[in-house]
Structure formats: structure tokens, C-alpha cells
């Protein structure tokens, strides 16, 4: 078990204690209902407790968010950018401390834990630049002495419902962009990772207070069935950005659409990498192995399928198994560990059930596929990553199991490879490893990858914050973070100005006035 004094030190470094309040509306609300207990997947030990938001307190939080919006939306966007810039600077100062909390609460390795905070910093930098680039078009009017253009207006309070696997960075993708757009943000973090959210909010709170801005960032905690449902059904929340499972996303989509609200849904990914005989095999091996093993397969963009050219299949698989054999599984606090724990025992159970189903459907287990026991962390949630040779007609490979399982397929033509690639319901991230321009262009054509993200000679896992992030099909649609995703957080308004001395009417209509 982890030393209790070490856990207390990690908590203290980020302003947390043994019991914390999970509601922030400009002040920390010292009341709540159920006590959520956060357990570390590293060894199963209890980290700390959080008092969840009550339904009555939720109502107060939303009212405060609406009030803050009425002030914040009137501020010039570059001034909004100043706040986001200072938040990014504060995160820089707290990067290592917050990164350790991420490792403790969700099991990410040290580099991945700090990388989570670095991503927030990078999004802040992006948003600061964006605060001076909220451009609209000037449109040619068909009427004399008229000018027409479009402008983008702040949308209102938005809700961000985040997942445990990226306990704070995905919040920043939405929140920092929405903030410079003039919105206020209500965050409902995963009940599996509430401590990271509270710690981040404490950093943000201090910056906002120091600069004297409205407290535009709010926090509510609780289960998806209570607080998540309130956020989804609340007409005052103009947009709900949800990251999570496909079934939950479909439910949220129905609830929000019934009130004609907006959604950004980042749901399941069943991402594949095509490995051509015309690829650089060293690059392909690195891309596939990292994509499948990083974050213990708990990324939306994790590589879950490798579609390998028959001409190199045997040699590629042999080298891949060798790479898997050398990948260390263990505590994320130990040097050299690549694969940390799954989030909880339910995740381990899902992993083992998927292995059994794959075996029953004719899949051949080439490597791993069992629970792992880590000395000193016997109550942790560890598994040996699995490589499975897929068989035609399998069903389990069409399902996203949020764990390190990689299915391998053979193909003979690029057309066959894309048929396998596009055969799943999800459509988030994709990649092809090939130095053949014809194969690459086919992969990028209308007959190619049906995913929202397409990578050439790099893996499926991860994405740069400057690009719009999101997928197609059952991945949900909508885009976050980069490119022109900022438009999701604003409303478009077409403006027509008549600066003439007459009012021309359509279809030649005249009035005797």
C-alpha cells in the first residue's frame, strides 16, 4: 500500500485535505449530500473524500453562472484572453504537483500526469491568441447602400462533463476556448476523478480573484444520474460538451436535443492503424505499440486494431510481441513503467471478459490477456496487455473495451484494409503507415478513412491542440480545441446595415407613404 504520509503530502501540495467540498460558484460551498470517495488505482487505497453537490446547491451555482455571464460577455475578447493567459502561467507553476495528483488518482505515469497539465497550458496559450481572432465574414450585399457581415456573439453558460481518463485537460479544451468566446463554464467531472478537478479549480480560483474578474468557472460534483442529468436538462446551459461512453452520450444527446440545446459529444473510439508492406516498419512498430499501450489503453484515441499487410504480417507481429514483452507494467510512480493500472476493478473485469469473448469467437491470444499482480500493490488494478489475432465474423472487436487490447488483422489489398478499417461503429482516430503515395491518398480519399482524425506515418493516440478534435459515426460528432472549434461556443449573427436614404423592398413592392 502507498504510504499514507505520501498521499497526504500530494494532497497538501495542491490544497486538498482528507475531506473536500466539491461545489464552487465563486466560493467553496461547505455543504453537500453524499460523500464520494476517490480511490487510487495504483493500489486501491483511499485517497480522500468529496462532498457532492446537492440539487438545491446546483440551482444556486447555475444562477451565479448566469450572473457572471451577464458581466463577462460584455468584456472585450482580448481582455478575456488576459485571464486565460494568467491561468496558464499559474498552471506552469503547479505542473509537477498537479501531475502527481493525476498519477495518484487515475494511474497515469509521471510523464503522462505532467503531460496532462502541459496540455492545459498549451490550450491556454492557443486560447490567448484566439482571443484576438474571433473573425466574422464581410458579405457582398445585393442591395445598394447596404453592408452585410456576420459576427459571433457569446453563447451563454456551457456545461462540461468530463471523463476520468483525461481528468482535467479535456475540460481546458472546452473551458479556455469558451472563456475567450465570452461564455461561463460549469464543470461536472467524473466521480472517479473529482480530486483533480477540485485542485485545478483552486488554482483557477486564485487567479480570477487576484485579477478581479467575475468567477466564470464553476464546479459541481456528483453522479451522472443526478448532477449530470441536471446539467443536460437545464435550458440555461446552452451547450453540453460530454466525454464518455456511447450509451451515456446517446442519452445526453436525447435530453439536450429535446430542449433544442447544443452538444459536443466525444464518445467511443475503436481506432485502427493500417501497416503497409511499403511502410518504415520501425516507425510503424513504435506507432502501434505506443498507441495501444499508452495510458494502459484508456485513451479515446488508443490503437485497438492493427491491420497488417500479409507480406509483412509474420515479421511485424513477431517484433510487436517482442516490444510488448519489454513494456513494464506497474506503479506509475516507478521509473521505466509504461503501462500503469486500469482505473478500477470493473475495468479489469471488462478486460478479462473481452479476452474470454474473443477466445470464444475464434480469436487467438498471441500475448498477455491476464490480470497482473504487482508486488506491494496487490490491490491495484493491473493487467498484462493483450495482442489477439482476429478472426472474420468476430463481434467483440467492434466494441471499444477501455483497456489495452490490440486486435491484429491481415489484408492483401488497400481496399480490403479500408473495408476492415471502416467496419466498426466508431469513427474517431485512424492512421496508415505507408510511404506509397497512392496508398496514402486512397486512405485520405472519400473512400478512405471514415474517422474525424487521419494520421499518416504516426499513431492514432493523441492529438495536437491546434487541430479540431472529434469523430464521426457513434463517436458522436462535434469538435473541440483547435481550428475553428471556437464557433461551437458562440452564436452566429448575420448583420445588415442600410446606410442609404431609401429602403429598397424585395420583389418590387412599393408603398405610397
Image (cartoon, rainbow, N blue to C red):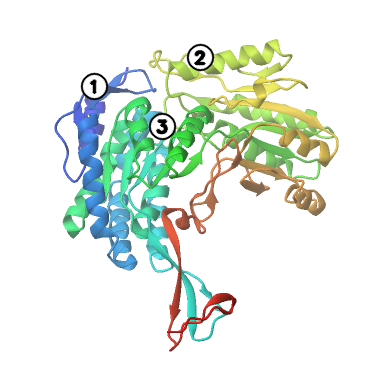
In front: label 1 or label 2? 1
In the rendering, which numbered label is found on residue 164?
Answer: 3
> For residue 34, what is the image quadrant?
top left
Q: Earlier in the sequence, mark 1 or mark 2?
A: 1
Task: Answer few, some or many: residues within 10 Å of disc 3's Cα (few below 14, many 20 plus, some between 14 and 19).
Answer: many
- Image quarter in which the N terminus is found: top left
Q: Which residue is mark 2?
A: 349
Between marks 1 and 2, how big is the CA–CA gap? Answer: 26 Å
> For residue 269, what is the image quadrant?
top right
The residue lying toward the viewer, choosing from 406 and 335, is 406
Mark 1 secondary-structure assignment: loop
The residue lying toward the viewer, choosing from 502 and 50, is 502
Q: Residue furthest front?
A: 512
**Residue 354 rendering spot, x and y as whole percentages:** 60, 17
Q: Does 455 sit above or below residue 166?
A: below
**Residue 14 rendering spot, x and y as whole percentages:** 24, 39
Amino acid at each position: 500500500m502507498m504510504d499514507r504520509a505520501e498521499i497526504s503530502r500530494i494532497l497538501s501540495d495542491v490544497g486538498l485535505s482528507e475531506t473536500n467540498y466539491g461545489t464552487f460558484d465563486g466560493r467553496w460551498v461547505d455543504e453537500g449530500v453524499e460523500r464520494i470517495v476517490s480511490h487510487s488505482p495504483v493500489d486501491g487505497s483511499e485517497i480522500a473524500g468529496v462532498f457532492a453537490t446537492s440539487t438545491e446547491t446546483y440551482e444556486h451555482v447555475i444562477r451565479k453562472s448566469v450572473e457572471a455571464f451577464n458581466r463577462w460577455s460584455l468584456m472585450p475578447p482580448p481582455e478575456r484572453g488576459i485571464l486565460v493567459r494568467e491561468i496558464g502561467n499559474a498552471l506552469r507553476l503547479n505542473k509537477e504537483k498537479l501531475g502527481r495528483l493525476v498519477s495518484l488518482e487515475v494511474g497515469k505515469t509521471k510523464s503522462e500526469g505532467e503531460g496532462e497539465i502541459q496540455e492545459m497550458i498549451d490550450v491556454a496559450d492557443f486560447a490567448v491568441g484566439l482571443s484576438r481572432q474571433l473573425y466574422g465574414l464581410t458579405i457582398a450585399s445585393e442591395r445598394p447602400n447596404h453592408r452585410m457581415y456576420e459576427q459571433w456573439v457569446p453563447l451563454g453558460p456551457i456545461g462540461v462533463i468530463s471523463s476520468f481518463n483525461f481528468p482535467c485537460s479535456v475540460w481546458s479544451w472546452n473551458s479556455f476556448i469558451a472563456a475567450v468566446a465570452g461564455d461561463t463554464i460549469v464543470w461536472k467531472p467524473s466521480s472517479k476523478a473529482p480530486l483533480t478537478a477540485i485542485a485545478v479549480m483552486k488554482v483557477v480560483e486564485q487567479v480570477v480573484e487576484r485579477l478581479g474578474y467575475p468567477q466564470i468557472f464553476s464546479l459541481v460534483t456528483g453522479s451522472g444520474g443526478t448532477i449530470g442529468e441536471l446539467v443536460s436538462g437545464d435550458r440555461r446551459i446552452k451547450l453540453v460538451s460530454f466525454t464518455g461512453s456511447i450509451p451515456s452520450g446517446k442519452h445526453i444527446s436525447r435530453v439536450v436535443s429535446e430542449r433544442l440545446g447544443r452538444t459536443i459529444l466525444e464518445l467511443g473510439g475503436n481506432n485502427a492503424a493500417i501497416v503497409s508492406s511499403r511502410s518504415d516498419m520501425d516507425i510503424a512498430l513504435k506507432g502501434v505499440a505506443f498507441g495501444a499501450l499508452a495510458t494502459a489503453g484508456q485513451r479515446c484515441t488508443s490503437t485497438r486494431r492493427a491491420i497488417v499487410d500479409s507480406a509483412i504480417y509474420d515479421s511485424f507481429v513477431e517484433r510487436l510481441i517482442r516490444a510488448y514483452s519489454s513494456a513494464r507494467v506497474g506503479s506509475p510512480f516507478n521509473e521505466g513503467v509504461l503501462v500503469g493500472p486500469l482505473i478500477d476493478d470493473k475495468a479489469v473485469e471488462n478486460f478479462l471478459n473481452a479476452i474470454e469473448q474473443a477466445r470464444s469467437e475464434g480469436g487467438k491470444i498471441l500475448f498477455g490477456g491476464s490480470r497482473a499482480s504487482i508486488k506491494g500493490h496487490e490491490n491495484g488494478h493491473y493487467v498484462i496487455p493483450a495482442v489477439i489475432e482476429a478472426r472474420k465474423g468476430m463481434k467483440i472487436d467492434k466494441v471499444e473495451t477501455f483497456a489495452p487490447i490490440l486486435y491484429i488483422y491481415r489484408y492483401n489489398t488497400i481496399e480490403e484494409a479500408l473495408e476492415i478499417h471502416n467496419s466498426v461503429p466508431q469513427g474517431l482516430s485512424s492512421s496508415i503507415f505507408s510511404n506509397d503515395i497512392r496508398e496514402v491518398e486512397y486512405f485520405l480519399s472519400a473512400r478512405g478513412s471514415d474517422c474525424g482524425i487521419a494520421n499518416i506515418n504516426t499513431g492514432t493516440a493523441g492529438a495536437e491542440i491546434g487541430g479540431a478534435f472529434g469523430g464521426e459515426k457513434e463517436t458522436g460528432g462535434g469538435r473541440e480545441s483547435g481550428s475553428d472549434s471556437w464557433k461551437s461556443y458562440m452564436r452566429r449573427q448575420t448583420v445588415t446595415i442600410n446606410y442609404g436614404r431609401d429602403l429598397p423592398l424585395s420583389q418590387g413592392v412599393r408603398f405610397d407613404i
